[in-house]
Image (cartoon, rainbow, N blue to C red):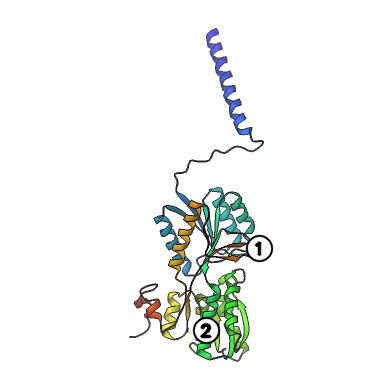
Amino acid sequence: MFMYKKKTLYGIMNLILCMCMMLSLTSCSGSETQVIPEESDGTIEIGFTFDSFIIERWERDRDVFVARAHELGAEVNVQNANGDVDAQISQIEYFIDKRVDAIVVVAVDCTALANVIAKAHRAGIKVISYDRLVSDANTDLYISFDNQEVGNLMAGSIISQIGKEGNIIMINGPLTDTNVPAVIEGFERRLEPGRITVEDTYYCNGWRPEYAFDYMNRYLADHDGVPPDAIMCGNDSIAGQTIKALSEHKLAGTCVVTGQDADLDACQRIVEGTQYMTVYKPVEKLAQRAAELTVEMVAQGRIVPEDTISDGTYQIPYEKLDPIEVTAENMDEVIIGTFHQRSEVYLNVDH
């Protein structure tokens, strides 16, 4: 009986000793618990948060980026913010908690992410502004197309059709997208030498194209059903809804309409004659290059930029790609077999 009690006493003392050792490990850094990092298998982990997939091209960007990252041995966790900036902030915080190596952002609101990106940087995570430059955040890279050149190409197309005089309106995306002011700047700069009047400028909140439809109907009602000489649209979805409104007034094809992204339905409208041009931005090239630079940045700690750009506060590395003007004249050369199939683009056109 004595031996049993003695063994029990020793067991209790050993248990207390073990508990004390555990407590000392969890309290040695003050009130915070020390967390032993999980062992990594060396795979680069990338978090990618998109504004939404309202714009057709983003699904293509996603698929190409993920495929190229996989080829380079990286894994990609894709999140969709559905146009909600608070959701996007939560997604970035989730990536921080997951301890990813890099976060790629297509910003919902380019002015609202600086604080959460600073948090990512404090955690040692690289952050890339993809296509849209996040303001005042000192992201580690901005990769996009030359957005001022996009505006320049749109203006050049309009001038080629209406000359250096006429009335136009501009239906843009939201100013929370830093690309929008850049496109407008390039557009207006090209117009300066002429006498083209910009009658009105409208912004579609959240890039929602239905707002363009409503605006165009209001414009026609206020102008006795007479359209402007040309309409500069921020993207092809906006152009599509603008042309829908014109069509309901039997005005489709009576004025020059421009867009960007080379969406399939926009290319169809171009060969059909209701939209004059779009700006093709080879997103495969952009997405592949972004994946390559992201992996390189994680592996090497930094990249040597070809250029830099101001995000309002900081000069950050900037890589820009060239956009291409597309009209009916060069559709086959630029788009067919590269971005869309001929049977799809010419679906409604007899040849």
Q: Position of residue 241 (x, y in %)?
A: 52, 79
Name which quarter of the figure residue 128 lies in. bottom right
Q: Which residue is mark 1?
A: 313
Asked if residue 290 shows in the view, the reply is: yes
- Amino acid marked by disc 1: Thr
Asked if residue 249 shows in the view, the reply is: no
Q: Position of residue 213 (x, y in %)?
A: 55, 79
Question: Which numbered dot is residue 149?
Answer: none
Q: Position of residue 297 (x, y in %)?
A: 50, 55
The residues bearing labels 1 and 2 have C-alpha atoms spaced at a distance of 32 Å
Name which quarter of the figure residue 226 lies in. bottom right
Q: Which residue is mark 2?
A: 156
- How packed mark 2 is, by other alpha carbons closer than 10 Å (few <14, some 14-19, many 20 or more), is some
- Amino acid marked by disc 2: Gly
Identify which residue, 26 or 272, lies in the foreground. Answer: 26
Vertical order, 322 against 12 (above or below): below
Which one is earlier in the sequence, the residue at label 1 or at label 2? 2
